[in-house]
Amino acid sequence: MTGLAKKDVIRISREKKVRFVRLWFTDILGFLKSFAITIRELERALEEGMGFDGSSVAGFARIDESDMVAMPDPSTFRILPWKASDHVVAAMFCDILEPEGNPYQGDPRWVLKKNLERAAQLGYTFNVGPELEYFYFQSSTGKPVLLDSGGYFDLTPLDVASDLRKQTVIVLEDMGILVEYSHHEAAPSQHEIDLRYSDALTMADSTMIYRLVVKEVALKNNVYASFMPKPVFGVNGSGMHTHQSLFRGRKNAFFDAKDQYHLSPIAKHYIAGLMKYAKEITLVTNQWVNSYKRLVPGYEAPVYISWAQKNRSDLIRIPVYKPGKEDATRVEYRSPDPACNPYFAFSVMLAAGLDGIERKYPLRDPVERNVYEMPEKERKKHGIESLPGDLYEAIQITEGSGLVKRALGEHVFYKFIENKKIEWERFRARVTDFELDQYFSIL
């Protein structure tokens, strides 16, 4: 039902006997927020928006400037698969406005729109296709207990959650979100459902819905789904490998038939931009303390800043070109995790790539060897640097980043940094199980 106008929303709501409409938006940390209106208020909401108090929303207004307006985007209207006491419920994403009607600079959706406008001014449409991994657990309380011991692409009986994935795919497609693949991932009880690529704003909205649907379906089956980057020690963490490309009209700007890697100069500059700013954008693509427990050698997660075609130990991978599939030429950025704010993650990746294009950064040679197994001296020889090792290091690097500040805007930039510093201080003061296990009985 996407792409609807206001009159279509009103008509469909009457035809489907919608009783409630949920208005969705996102805080700066990437958590979905929602409040509901009755169908009586729908027409007014579409024209005027609905006021709410923004002072309690992370990264939004202070107490003395708390009034906000949620303006529904009719193009995002959809009927939800779950009813409220047998009443039909619909939902729309909202743009957040100030009372005077200006876009609110703390709205993640607005941040992404501004970056997409910059791409449009250069003649590009930004398409993304994220691969979101997650785990199923028996419960959300206590220590995580896995559902299965399956592995990559396993089928029953080891993959006991295949029906959960099937239910999830059906719900997503019923909501207008196209799915390409679903399968068991490498770690026990780890799963992946890949969405078909689309423009970045649609995909950011779809990512928010995806996370909600995965959790709702799990809950209805009396299990718990988690997008925590590294919930279990000793197995792979969950990533959000993000495939991205730029189009000029209907033509893929990344494709060049004559190039060895079938990459255009634009694509190479874009990759060079991602690599140049990889350290600076990691706080956004990997925003939690726990994110850095995934970014360690040995678990298929990238640690070193390099690129290649076939090598999955690199930060950036270029999927192998298939004849006749020029539109599929793309860059896969492998460090983001599924607990990020997708509006911000897509924004900073795009900003880094565009800066590479505008400044014509040169792309160094690919690294087709396993970077994890290289001696440190050899990595230095090839100029291969590392991503930040923990949240504190990421904060320190991003705090000095002009690119991230421009991409997010000053309001979000400072609020986000402030929030991450608080998180680090809370983590730093906590006594962990590791410390108790290692030291309590001997010190």
Image (tube, grey):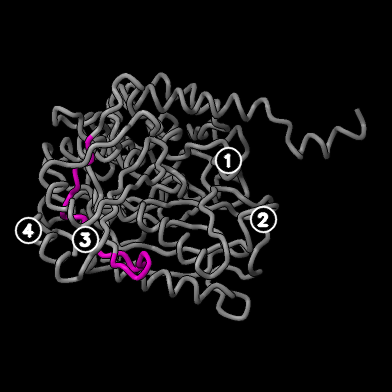
Sequence order check: which comes first, mark 1 or mark 3? 1
Q: Which amino acid does label 2 sit on?
A: Pro
The answer to which image quadrant residue 12 occupies is: bottom left
Mark 2 touches mark 4? (CB < 8 Å) = no
Sequence order check: which comes first, mark 3 or mark 2? 2
243 sits left or right of 144 in the view: left
Q: Which of marks 1 and 2 is in front?
A: 2
**Magenta-span inclusion, residue 427:** no
Sequence order check: which comes first, mark 2 or mark 4? 4
Which residue is drawn at the image coordinates 33% and 32% (left, top)? 54
Q: Which mark is residue 144?
A: 2
Which residue is drawn at the image coordinates 17% and 55% (left, top)? 40
Q: Which of 122 and 412 is in front in this view?
A: 412
**Is the residue marked by circle 2 packed among few (<14), some (14-19), or many (20+) residues within 10 Å?**
some
For marks 4 and 1, give the CA distance: 45 Å
Q: Name the residue under label 1.
A: 290
Sequence order check: which comes first, mark 1 or mark 2? 2
The answer to which image quadrant residue 180 occupies is: bottom left
Q: Name the residue under label 4.
A: 7
Mark 3 touches mark 2? (CB < 8 Å) = no
Q: Which amino acid does label 1 sit on?
A: Asn
Q: Nearer the viewer, residue 353 or 156?
A: 156
Q: Mark 3 points at which residue?
A: 327
Magenta-colored span? 69-88
336 sits left or right of 149 in the view: left
**Is the residue marked by circle 1 packed among few (<14), some (14-19), or many (20+) residues within 10 Å?**
some
